[in-house]
Image (cartoon, coloured by chain):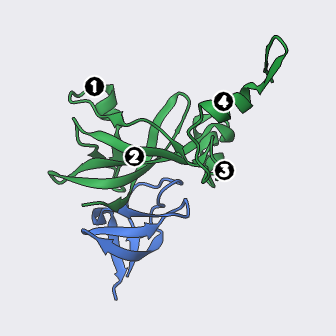
Amino acid sequence: MVSFFTGFFYFGTYEEWYNKHVSKSNKSGILELADIPIGKNLGAAAFRDEIKLPNGQLAKITEGTKITKVVVFAGKGTKRKINVAKYLSKQYNIPESEWKKVRGEGFVDYHGVSRRAELHWFEAKGIDRIKMKVKRWLD
Amino acid sequence: MNVKFIGESDPLALLKNKIYKVISIEKGWYRIKDETGEDYLFPPEAFEIVKSN
């Protein structure tokens, strides 16, 4: 634990300073994140941002759009636990405590139509957006 | 309505041959409580209807 001392003044621990000045967690324990731009080319990012459909096919997030209103609503940095964290930990070899459950609003391509949807996914340090699912249609 | 999932099993989504209750149908997609315990929308192609209302 790191404490901040300047002369005779004590500024508390780094965690106290971070929570006061940096963290965007609100009282409900939700952590707001920046919008996620979806690339227009077929690069790595475009391949990654996709929803695996139950039949094994993939519904991609519409290229050239953004995933907006991105918030972490469970897991690391919030008050709510992820009830499947132990499965994620086992599958990806990343500690349970590192996982975040995130939601955002984006556009999903399905059968040639782009629809606005609330999306949920998991992520952790070194693991971008996985297990992306459609929570509800917004259009 | 009850449906049988005939796609690929995923312990964090749906399990093959398991019967799921369709909570609602929204723009053609089935709202189902999956293995994470939360309800999500899934496209109908990977399900067989086993009991319709």
Q: Nearer the viewer, residue A53 or A3?
A: A3
Which chain letter goes with mark 1? A
Q: Quadrant of residue A2?
A: top right
Task: Find the distance from the CA under tag 4 to the CA under tag 3.
Answer: 16 Å
Q: Secondary structure at mark 1?
A: loop
Task: Find the distance from the CA under tag 3 to the CA under tag 1.
Answer: 35 Å
Residue under pointer 2: A69
The single residue placed furthest to the front in the displayed view is: A8
* Colour in which the image shows chain A: green
Instruction: Estimate how packed mark 4 is, as few (under 14), some (14 to 19) or many (20 or more) residues with alpha carbons within 10 Å.
Output: few
Instruction: Estimate how packed mark 1 is, as few (under 14), some (14 to 19) or many (20 or more) residues with alpha carbons within 10 Å.
Output: few
Task: Find the distance from the CA under tag 1 to the CA under tag 4.
Answer: 35 Å
Asked if labels 2 and 3 touch by Cβ distance under 8 angstroms, the answer is: no
Disc 1 or disc 4, which is closer to the eye?
A: 4
> Quick one: label 2 or label 1, which is nearer the N terminus?
1
Q: Nearer the viewer, residue A109 or A105?
A: A105
Residue under pointer 3: A79
State the image coordinates of residue B36 (x, y, percent, origin top left): 55, 59
Task: Find the distance from the CA under tag 4 to the CA under tag 2.
Answer: 22 Å
Residue type at mark 2?
Lys
Q: Is residue A139 visible?
A: yes
Q: Secondary structure at mark 4?
A: helix
Residue type at mark 3?
Lys
Task: Find the distance from the CA under tag 3 to the CA under tag 2.
Answer: 19 Å
